[in-house]
Amino acid sequence: NSHLGKDVVVGANTYFSHTNAKGGVHGKKIEFIQYDDKYEPENTLSHTQTLIEKDKVFALFGFVGTPTVKRVLPLISHTNIPFIAPYTGASFLRDNSSDNIINFRSSYIEEIDALVDYLTQEKGLSKFAIFYQNDDYGEEGYIALSQALDKHHLKLSAEGTYKRNTLSISHAIHEIESAKPEAIILVGAYKPTARFIEKVKECCPQNIIFCPISFVNADALVDELKGDARNILFSQTVPSYDDFTSSEAIEYTNLLKFYYPNEKPSLVSYESYLAAKTVVKAMREINGLLTQAKFTQALKNTNRYTLDNIPLGYHHSQLLNRVYLSTYENKKFNIISKHEY
């Protein structure tokens, strides 16, 4: 899952670097400190303790992953440090139990609801399976799919799991293929998900629609599949970065090219960039001493038009409440459906 973590850093640092080059915020520069937890929760805990106790950070930003974030939740709640824009759609971050947690992106419940709604209403599908990571992240996806299917009076046809940080997908394929699903919701990391799609296409001749949620990392998945995105319906939590009717997309691609000339644009780094820009704009709204309490309050009061034509509004413990469904054709993500929550 390294590609995803790297893109979160690249996107955020693109805007933070741009901010620092223009003098920072209220005369102070932003220092963005990162540690690699290798997608292992115990590493996340030790690194978070270092960030809080040794680095004395003002806020925590852009943590990647559901099982990793869940491991540090008690620490975050205890210290009350601002915990901003984690890259996960986990429901336990959206239950309003902690005032210091502010999500940027839509939830996995909303993403999967949008996928099921579109596939049942627009495509007339009724047979769904799920391929998911056997941990807290996968469980979130499984529960979200069950709830979405219930709304349409449908039941899950099959399920298959794999172990985090492995490519052990054979058992999952065996569990799913005999059910002959019409659509498979994919709740994993991009490498095992790519292998799964390839193997299912080999063994199952019918035109199954594969539906990766945003954490799968659409750009990395397309790369792993060598550009072959046939029969894939992607869920995004931000618009496409190549939508040049948006000043945000234009600014992002130009600044990325300047600060990271060797990096390609991606939905992950674009989301992280937009979250970082929202953070900086909230800081600039604060009068007097910049405190953690003022910072979280400023974020919760973010103006709807902070990001040009990408509407923000703090509810459901998150700022961005849209899901975009897309296909990948002609080397770009083409949005075919938008869902507001």
Image (tube, helix red, strand yellow):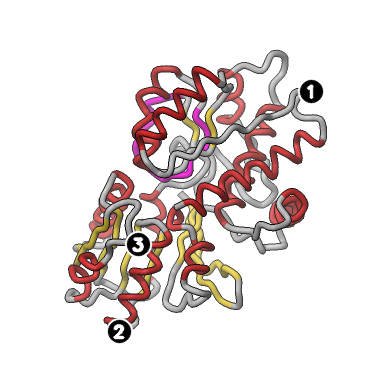
Front in this rendered view, residue 267 or 114: 267
Query: Chief secondary structure of the magenta span?
Result: loop
How busy is the neighbourhood of tag 1: few (under 14 within 10 Å), some, or many (20 plus)?
A: few
| Residue at point 61%, 52% (across, down) | 270
Front in this rendered view, residue 76 or 157: 76
Whether pointer 3 and pointer 1 mark residues with C-beta atoms closer than 8 Å, the reply is: no
* Residue at the far right in the pictured view: 22
- Element at label 3: strand
The residue segment tinted magenta is: 83-99
| Residue at point 40%, 73% (across, down) | 122
The answer to which quarter of the image holds residue 159 is bottom left
How busy is the neighbourhood of tag 2: few (under 14 within 10 Å), some, or many (20 plus)?
A: few
Left or right: 1 with respect to 16? left
- Element at label 2: loop
Tell me: residue 14, above or below residue 296: below
Question: Percent x, y for residue 162?
Answer: 26, 58
Front in this rendered view, residue 104 or 132: 132
Which disc, if any, is residue 186? Answer: 3
How busy is the neighbourhood of tag 3: few (under 14 within 10 Å), some, or many (20 plus)?
A: many
The answer to which quarter of the image holds residue 46 is top left
| Residue at point 32%, 61% (across, down) | 167
Question: Percent x, y for residue 260?
Answer: 71, 51
> Which amino acid type is shown beneath numbered disc 2?
Gln
- Element at label 1: loop
Whether pointer 1 and pointer 2 mark residues with C-beta atoms closer than 8 Å, the reply is: no
According to the image, label 2 marks what residue? 206
> Which amino acid type is shown beneath numbered disc 1?
Gly
According to the image, label 1 marks what residue? 27
Which disc, if any, is residue 326? Answer: none
Front in this rendered view, residue 249 or 173: 173
| Residue at point 37%, 69% (across, down) | 195
- Does label 2 or label 3 sit earlier along the sequence? 3
